[in-house]
């Protein structure tokens, strides 16, 4: 236990050593954090107190769209003494701290409470659902030891629902097993969009997609956009040749080798010499994909989204730049949102904290 505490203290010292400038909040403020989650996921929002001038009692009402969000648990932050929160997890929900006999004001800042929400099935992808705090100033919902009303500014937050692209089912893909993974050899579907998953389950076992075989999607003229997984190590020659309507490709693998005429080409007199007009590929910088595109005169778009946990900078790698971003986020100097916030949640518990910082440090130093 002492070792763990020592590690966390060292982390705190390391984090606090960073210099940064940020706009300071000077007025008493109650802030609801923001988060992003997919349908069916559970995510935590915290209600935080800043610049507390001193209070003994506070009552807050939390409103949210119960058709999209379900409040599943509430954890008190322990900074305002005894509480009498509403036992039913209903909408609106009431948080209440009452210390009428206190002779000294609570001046501490920090997390008042943490609320866990599950995103309901009928939540609309791409929509943001506010979680709003309110209180009645005139009704003495917040006051100090001298029974004086105290006013706080409220900054509301909420939950944005992730847009999830439908994944191409394995039943529409022809495949074989290769190098202990899946090699895609053909396509039997007719969709204009293709989104190949990192993994598929076959006979109860999960396999990574490693290879797109030669000519696997050649001549699929209905394809307009393709998204390929981060697990790929090879896209073989002619893989998407003669796909004349295919204009948009996103490649999540940083190191996949690209075969001749794999993308953006069509045959002229039997030879893959024509270039598809308007073809673009989003891929990582310094990748084989970029070299392929530049050699063909095709448009390269730099990939800036995280490839997975720990890749906070969206470079496709985990390095010191990710550590800097994590430190800034913990110090509230630069806030991570969306995919970048998800990438920072290394242990997947719905929040980004010192435990994630320690785990990220291990990843960057290659410690298991």
Image (cartoon, helix red, strand yellow):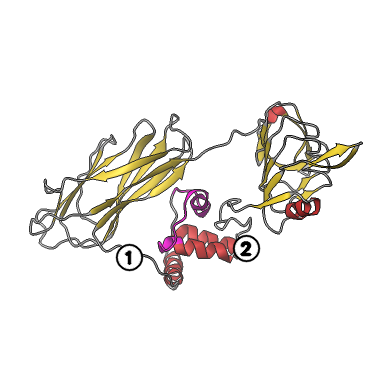
Q: CA distance from mark 2 to mark 1?
A: 37 Å
The residue under the point 60% across, 65% down is 365
135 up-or-down from 324: above or below: above
Q: Is residue 214 visible?
A: no
Residue 158, x across and y down, in percent: 37, 44
The residue carrying pointer 1 sits among few (fewer than 14), some (14 to 19) or many (20 or more) residues within 10 Å by Cα, namely few
Query: Label 1, on which residue?
Result: 24
Asked which secondary structure carries label 2, the reply is loop
Q: Quadrant of residue 219?
A: top right
292 up-or-down from 164: above or below: below
Q: Which residues are magenta?
A: 329-350
Q: Nearer the viewer, mark 2 or mark 1?
A: 1
The residue under the point 50% across, 62% down is 325
The residue carrying pointer 2 sits among few (fewer than 14), some (14 to 19) or many (20 or more) residues within 10 Å by Cα, namely few
Residue 351, x across and y down, in percent: 43, 51
Asked if residue 334 lies in the magenta stretch, the reply is yes
Query: Label 2, on which residue?
Result: 366
Residue 308, x across and y down, in percent: 59, 50
**Image quarter hosting the N terminus:** bottom left
Mark positioned earlier in the residue sequence (2 or 1): 1
């Amino acid at each position: 236990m002492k070792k763990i505490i020592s590690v966390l203290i060292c982390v705190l010292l390391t984090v606090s050593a960073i210099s940064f400038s940020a706009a300071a909040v000077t007025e008493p403020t109650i802030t609801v954090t923001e988060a992003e989650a997919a349908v069916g996921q559970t995510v935590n929002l915290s209600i935080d107190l800043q610049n507390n001038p001193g209070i003994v009692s506070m009552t807050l009402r939390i409103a949210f769209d119960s058709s999209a969000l379900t409040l599943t648990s509430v954890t008190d932050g322990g900074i305002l003494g005894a509480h009498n929160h509403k036992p039913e997890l209903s909408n609106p929900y009431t948080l209440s701290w009452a210390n009428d006999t206190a002779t000294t004001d609570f001046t501490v800042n920090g997390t008042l409470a943490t609320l866990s929400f599950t995103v309901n099935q009928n939540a609309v992808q791409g929509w943001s659902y506010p979680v709003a705090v309110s209180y009645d100033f005139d009704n003495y919902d917040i006051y100090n030891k001298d029974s004086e009303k105290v006013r706080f500014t409220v900054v509301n937050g909420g939950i944005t629902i992730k847009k999830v692209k439908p994944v191409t089912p394995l039943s529409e893909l022809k495949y074989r097993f290769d190098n202990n993974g899946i090699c895609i050899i053909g396509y039997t579907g007719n969709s204009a969009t293709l989104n190949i998953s990192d993994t598929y389950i076959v006979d109860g076992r999960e396999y990574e997609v490693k290879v797109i075989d030669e000519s696997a999607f050649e001549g699929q003229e209905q394809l307009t956009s393709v998204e390929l997984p981060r697990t790929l190590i090879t896209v073989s020659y002619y893989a998407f040749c003669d796909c004349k309507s295919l204009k948009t490709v996103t490649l999540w693998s940083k190191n996949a080798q690209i075969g001749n005429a794999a993308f953006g080409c069509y045959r002229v007199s039997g030879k893959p010499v024509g270039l598809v007009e308007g073809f673009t590929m989003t891929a990582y910088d310094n990748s084989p994909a970029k070299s392929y595109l530049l050699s063909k005169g095709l448009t390269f778009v730099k990939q800036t989204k995280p490839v997975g946990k720990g890749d906070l900078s969206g470079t496709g790698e985990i390095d010191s730049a990710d550590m800097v971003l994590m430190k800034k986020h913990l110090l509230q100097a630069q806030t991570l949102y969306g995919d970048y916030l998800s990438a920072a949640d290394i242990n997947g518990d719905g929040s980004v904290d010192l435990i994630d910082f320690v785990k990220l440090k291990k990843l960057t130093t290659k410690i298991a």
